[in-house]
Image: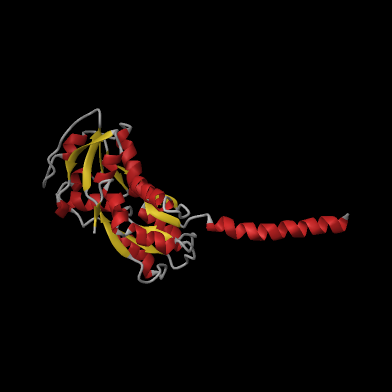
């Protein structure tokens, strides 16, 4: 009986050894992507899977949080940042696979208000943002780390309204969290990307920030040096291809 159990155990281990690699092949690469890419990157992953590939797994968060995860050794295959500085940070640590970094998307910055409370502000130097807020707060991603918040702070400084609103901020961990504050009516105004406003029916655009009021909004993609997934490079190439970029344009992104 003991020999029979030992034989069965050996057979089970042999079958498991055969099944495990097959299961691994059915799991797509892990992509760490900026929160603003939720709908578009999901659609791109679906399109890639429709071609017969294992569907990529995607983890969305603020680019700053994702970069720190990578630096801490989080296992992943690809990083898509909402700005160049956080990709620079990861690259400076030797954590990117050489010659895989490409900047492929652009975006713009907008002021949003709850859909049920229409208002419009002409965004220009000295515009009355503080007065429009009154005693309420401005929803914005973390202005010291998250790309959307950094761009927002740049714009408010260059438009000479930062001193009047810096004490009236409702900081959020990422741009989608800031968007949610406005859509739920918890904040009367917020600063997000144009693509975020387009994705959320609970808000409307109250103003558009001039492109020269902040640094160019640029999304780079790169493979991580630790990636070993056989499909990672193929998916990266798909994202930066004409077909892949067309997916992102459907969601309002500009392409490069």
| Frontmost residue, 53 versus 68 | 53
Tell me residue 220's x, y (percent).
Answer: 31, 60
Residue drawn where x is 32% and y is 42% of the image: 178
Q: Dividing the image into 4 quarters, which one contains the C terminus? A: bottom left
Q: Residue furthest top?
A: 116
Q: Residue furthest right?
A: 1
Tell me residue 222's x, y (percent).
Answer: 37, 63
Number of numbered discs: 0
Q: Dividing the image into 4 quarters, which one contains the N terminus? A: bottom right
| Frontmost residue, 181 versus 167 | 181
> Is 88 positioned to the left or the right of 77 in the image?
left
Q: Is residue 2 above or below residue 112?
A: below
Dividing the picture into quadrants, the one containing residue 132 is top left
| Frontmost residue, 196 versus 212 | 196
Q: Is residue 241 above or below residue 204?
A: below
Q: Is residue 220 above or below residue 177?
A: below
Tell me residue 63's x, y (percent).
Answer: 36, 55
Dividing the picture into quadrants, the one containing residue 92 is bottom left
Residue 139 seen in the current view:
no
Residue drawn where x is 28% and y is 59% of the image: 104
Dividing the picture into quadrants, the one containing residue 7 is bottom right
Tell me residue 116's x, y (percent).
Answer: 25, 28
Q: How is the image coloured?
A: secondary structure
Residue 253 seen in the current view:
yes
> Is 165 positioned to the left or the right of 87 in the image?
left
């Amino acid at each position: 009986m003991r020999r029979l159990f030992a034989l069965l155990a050996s057979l089970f281990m042999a079958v498991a050894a055969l099944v495990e690699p097959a299961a691994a092949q059915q799991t797509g690469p892990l992509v760490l992507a900026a929160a603003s890419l939720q709908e578009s990157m999901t659609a791109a992953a679906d399109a890639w899977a429709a071609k017969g590939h294992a569907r990529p797994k995607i983890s969305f968060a603020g680019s700053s949080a994702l970069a720190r995860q990578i630096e801490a050794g989080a296992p992943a295959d690809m990083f898509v940042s909402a700005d160049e500085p956080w990709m620079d940070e990861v690259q400076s640590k030797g954590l990117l696979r050489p010659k895989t970094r490409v900047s492929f998307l652009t975006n713009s910055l907008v002021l949003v208000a709850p859909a049920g409370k229409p208002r419009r502000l002409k965004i220009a130097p000295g515009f009355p943002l503080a007065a429009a807020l009154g005693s309420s707060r401005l929803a914005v991603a973390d202005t010291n780390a998250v790309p959307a918040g950094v761009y927002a702070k740049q714009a408010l400084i260059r438009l000479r309204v930062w001193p009047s609103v810096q004490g009236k901020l409702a900081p959020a961990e990422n741009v989608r969290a800031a968007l949610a504050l406005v859509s739920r009516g918890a904040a009367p105004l917020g600063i997000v990307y144009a693509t975020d406003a387009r994705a959320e029916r609970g808000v409307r655009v109250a103003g558009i920030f001039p492109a020269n009021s902040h640094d160019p909004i640029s999304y780079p993609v790169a493979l991580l040096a630790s990636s070993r997934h056989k499909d990672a490079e193929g998916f990266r190439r798909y994202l930066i291809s004409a077909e892949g970029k067309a997916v992102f344009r459907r969601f309002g992104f500009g392409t490069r």
